[in-house]
Image (tube, helix red, strand yellow):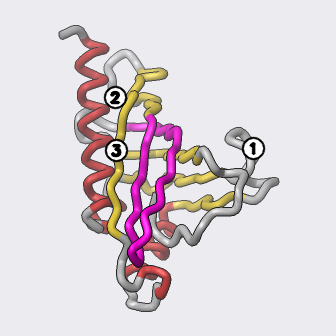
Amino acid sequence: MNALQELRADAESFLYREARLLDTQRFEDWLDLFTDDATYWVPAGRDDIDPARHVSIIHDDKAAMARRVKRLRSGFAFAQEPASRLHRIVSNVDIVDADADGGSCEVHCMMLLVELARHRQTMHSAHCEFTLTGSRPQWRIRRKKVNLLRNGEALECISYLL
């Protein structure tokens, strides 16, 4: 296995772990994957808009992400009573850019999220972009961008984390 294949395998394992933490509602462990200066962004309308000038579905820093998790845990997230059951499928993992030692890299992937809530199944497809930093394979996420395929349409209540 060459260095790029090893880097890709480490990135895949990391992204699978992130998906598993979200699917099993281990939100605090999921938050620990992010750097203190992280951003979590879900654009609305187009994938390459300026979130400072255009509306986004989500555009959070780590503090806002923590508030989102706290609300989900509060018992007052009524749209999540009962909590949605979620499965994420991560595929097509691609290393877009990496520094020479693999300590930080830009990783893209495809994600299919399947939600079951109140006897109704909904699917969301997305192209995700991650900026991973630190020592591999214990990376941390500096930036997560989720480009929903349907980001220009009216979306059902998305009261969980993508």
- In the picture, measured across the screen, residue 135 lies left or right of residue 123, that is left
Decide: marks 1, 3 in contact (CB < 8 A)?
no
Which of 32 and 125 lies nearest the eye of the viewer? 125
The residue that mark 3 highlights is 89
The residue that mark 2 highlights is 103
Q: Is residue 1 above or below residue 22?
A: above
Q: Amino acid at mark 1?
A: Ile
Give the spatial CA distance, label 2 vs label 1.
28 Å
Name the N-terminal-most of marks 2 and 1. 1
- In the picture, measured across the screen, residue 95 lies left or right of residue 49, that is left
Label 3 secondary element: strand
Residue 121, percent from left and from top: 43, 63
Which of 103 and 5 lies nearest the eye of the viewer? 5
**Residue under the image location 39 percent in, 90 percent down:** 75
Q: Amino acid at mark 3?
A: Ile
Segment colored magenta: 110-133
Q: Farthest residue to the top: give it.
A: 2
The residue that mark 1 highlights is 49
**Residue under the image location 40 percent in, 37 percent down:** 132
Decide: marks 3, 2 in contact (CB < 8 A)?
no
Decide: marks 2, 1 in contact (CB < 8 A)?
no
Residue 6, percent from left and from top: 23, 19
Name the N-terminal-most of marks 3 and 2. 3
Q: In this rendering, which labeled residue sits more in front, label 2 or label 1?
A: 1
Q: Amino acid at mark 2?
A: Gly
Crowdedness near tag 3: few (<14), some (14–19) or many (≥20) residues, C-alpha within 10 Å: few
Image quadrant containing the N terminus: top left
Q: Based on the displayed image, in which of its 4 quarters is residue 81 positioned?
A: bottom left
Q: Farthest residue to the right: give it.
A: 53
Residue 108, percent from left and from top: 46, 32
Q: Based on the displayed image, in which of its 4 quarters is residue 134 positioned?
A: top left
